Image (cartoon, coloured by chain):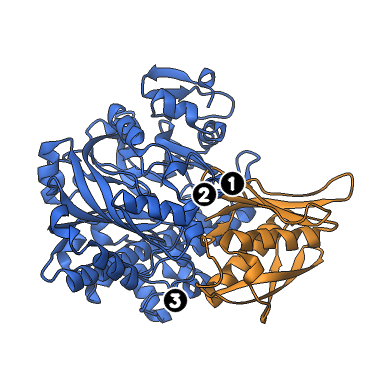
Chain colours: A blue, B orange
């Protein structure tokens, strides 16, 4: 991105000044090298989002922002329904409530070493991953609707996990006001055999080691210990979410509101029939993702116990990074309920936020930043400043620096798997081509992204995790 | 990656996070068929997909560009719910109504060199147009 087009406010805050139809400025939080590496499309898309009715304060881009669909990926925008605010299917994304959850184990990396290969095989066998994989659970329509209303709470009631898990999931594991009747029959059919599956692309299940602690106090509050083994699960709402995105993007293009000549930005007023239907369907999609990650957690626990009897896996936290949620924020000193879109961005509530579980309320929300196989992942914590900076939001991952097309020309999957094994990372995959497309070198430097989030005061680094086993979706 | 470079053909092109598909042809129908092949090739190696089973789809849209999105999304849907891959496509347009024939087989994880699922066809970089030489182009970004 051309730095000349931006106003530098600090080393980590860059503005697209308000002009033309923009109602608010665009604000990018990133270091100079990360900004220089961003596609010009990020600037264009952020400026376009800033034209949408009802937008508050600014359109924001996180340090890992890249070219998305209408909204940049790594984009945050909040809308006031009383000022004509809108909801956008592109601002949520196709993989509704895609997110990351991290689990503690009672193991150290050293204790894992002797059974690492066995565990990799067990996880690969027990957790369905990749194109065309199906889950053991097949839902009929009535059960599907219960799942779409109940989310992870539904899954726990069905025996997948336990009550303690729920308080470590945003909204207690269930988005309220989900409306399964606004989810198409096609979306439900697409989901029928996909419960408890990882999916493909950048989705993964990783066993990781806590390699570095940055913030001792927060790490202790989160229960993270040096060299502890943790498990991270990155996946979303599977076929159901994808189909809801497809259905409503089309509806918004045809029947919604397109403020500028860019169909990608099609949206609907929050106070409209279409807006309300999408909200109800999207919340059902959130519940599907939460139920999915809960079922996968159950499968992971089973695989671990099969290899290491007696091992306990407890939930650190579960965050979603493709959502629109109602949140209370202060705008011009007035407390207002806003619809906050986060597309490839993680909520990062600071200390004292009432929505945090009691055990975390004094510290702040865990922010889980996924890397890609072979690279680091991070646990951050929300800051008090984050609310004013970007409605309590932070980055979600490394973000790609190279397209899939380029990556598949640059790397060979088999060779990558062998190289990573030499570095102590066991990859299990059904697709070497998929591995090549997801090569670590095709992503931005996650360390630089996490560091930029900290310097921008969006969130603070707590711990760095390195992979030991990766089951690729 | 690309298919034939003559009048009819297809190619992938770069998008930051996902992948673009582009079909060319002597008619909009042919460009749509080629774009469908480009889509399948995002998911798997199409050369190994046998033509054993036929599926028919119908789509409508207010304009030709949205019809391309609907067509590609219909294929994504059929791939997902039938657990199939398709290697041959036939498109017949009647105004803004499309009838498509998809020919393929059930997914075989060992044989098909699967890469990534397609989540949906988007309206990003969406274009359906005919150039001065009569060559049709049909393209958009696929979210994977």
Q: Do the residues at pointers 2 and 1 share their chain?
A: yes
Residue underneath mark 3: A192
- Give the quarter of the figure containing the C terminus of chain A: bottom left
| Residue A311 in the figure: left or right of residue A345 | left
Chain label for disc 2:
A
Chain label for disc 3:
A
Q: Which of marks 1 and 3 is in front?
A: 3
**Residue A90 badge:** 2
- How far from the left and from the top, in percent, is residue B38? 66, 58
Disc 2 element? loop
Query: Would you call the spot at circle 3 few (<14 residues within 10 Å), some (14-19), or many (20 or more)?
Result: many
Q: Is residue A295 visible?
A: no
- How far from the left and from the top, in percent, is residue A291? 32, 67
Q: Are marks 2 and 1 in contact (CB under 8 Å)?
A: yes
Choose between A34 and A8: the one closer to the eye: A34
Residue A393 vs A432, above or below: the answer is above
Q: Do the residues at pointers 2 and 3 share their chain?
A: yes
**Residue A264 badge:** 1
| Residue at the far right in the pictured view | B133
Disc 3 element? loop
- How far from the left and from the top, in percent, is residue A465? 24, 46
């Amino acid at each position: 991105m051309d730095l000349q087009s931006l106003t530098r406010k600090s080393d980590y805050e860059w503005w697209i000044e308000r002009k033309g139809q923009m109602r608010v400025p665009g604000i990018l939080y990133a270091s100079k090298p990360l900004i220089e590496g961003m596609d010009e499309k990020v600037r264009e898309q952020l400026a376009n989002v800033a034209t949408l009715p009802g937008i508050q304060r600014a359109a924001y881009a996180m340090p890992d922002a890249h070219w998305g669909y209408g909204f940049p990926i790594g984009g945050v925008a909040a809308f006031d329904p009383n000022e004509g605010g809108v909801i956008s299917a592109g601002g949520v994304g196709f993989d509704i409530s895609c997110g990351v959850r991290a689990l503690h184990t009672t193991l150290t990396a050293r204790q894992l070493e002797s059974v690492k290969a066995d565990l990799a095989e067990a996880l690969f066998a027990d957790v369905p991953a990749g194109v065309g994989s199906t889950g053991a659970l097949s839902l009929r329509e009535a059960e599907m609707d219960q799942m779409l209303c109940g989310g992870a709470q539904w899954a726990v009631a069905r025996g997948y996990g336990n009550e303690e898990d729920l308080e470590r999931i945003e909204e207690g594991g269930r988005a309220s006001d989900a409306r399964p009747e606004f989810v198409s029959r096609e979306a439900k059919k697409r989901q029928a055999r996909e419960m408890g599956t990882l999916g493909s692309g950048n989705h993964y299940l990783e066993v990781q080691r806590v390699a570095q602690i940055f913030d001792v106090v927060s790490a202790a509050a989160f229960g993270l210990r040096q060299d502890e083994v943790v498990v991270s699960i990155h996946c979303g709402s599977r076929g159901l979410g994808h189909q809801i995105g497809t259905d409503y993007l089309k509806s918004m293009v045809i029947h919604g509101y397109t403020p500028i000549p860019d169909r990608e930005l099609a949206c609907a007023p929050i106070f409209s029939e279409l807006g309300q239907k999408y909200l109800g369907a999207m919340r059902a999609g959130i519940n599907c993702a939460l139920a999915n990650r809960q079922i996968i957690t159950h499968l992971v626990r089973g695989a671990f116990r099969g290899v290491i009897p007696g091992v306990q896996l407890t939930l650190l936290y579960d965050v979603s990074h493709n959502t629109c949620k109602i949140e209370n924020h202060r705008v011009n000193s007035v407390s207002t309920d806003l619809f906050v879109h986060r597309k490839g961005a993680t909520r990062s509530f600071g200390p004292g936020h009432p929505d945090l579980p009691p055990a975390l309320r004094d510290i702040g929300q865990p922010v889980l930043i996924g890397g890609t196989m072979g690279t680091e992942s991070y646990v951050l914590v929300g800051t008090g400043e984050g609310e004013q900076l970007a409605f309590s939001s932070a980055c979600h991952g490394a973000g790609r620096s190279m397209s899939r097309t380029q990556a598949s020309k640059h790397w060979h999957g088999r060779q990558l798997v062998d190289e990573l094994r030499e570095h102590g990372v066991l990859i299990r995959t059904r697709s070497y081509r998929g591995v090549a497309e997801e090569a670590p070198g095709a992503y931005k430097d996650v360390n630089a992204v996490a560091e930029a989030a900290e310097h921008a005061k969006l969130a603070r680094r707590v711990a760095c995790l390195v992979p030991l086993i990766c089951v690729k979706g | 990656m690309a298919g034939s470079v003559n009048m009819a053909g297809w190619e992938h092109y770069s998008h930051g996070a996902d992948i673009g598909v582009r079909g060319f042809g002597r008619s909009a129908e042919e460009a749509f068929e080629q774009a469908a092949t480009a889509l399948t090739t995002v998911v798997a190696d199409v050369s190994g997909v046998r033509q054993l089973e036929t599926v028919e789809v119908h789509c409508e849209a207010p304009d030709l560009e949205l019809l391309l999105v609907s067509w590609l999304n219909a294929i994504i849907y059929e791939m997902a719910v039938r657990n199939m891959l398709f290697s041959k496509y036939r498109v017949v347009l009647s105004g803004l109504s499309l009838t498509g024939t998809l020919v393929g087989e059930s997914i075989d994880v060992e044989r098909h060199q699967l890469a990534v699922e397609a989540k949906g066809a988007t309206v990003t970089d969406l274009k359906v147009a005919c150039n001065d030489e009569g060559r049709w182009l049909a393209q958009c970004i696929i979210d994977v």
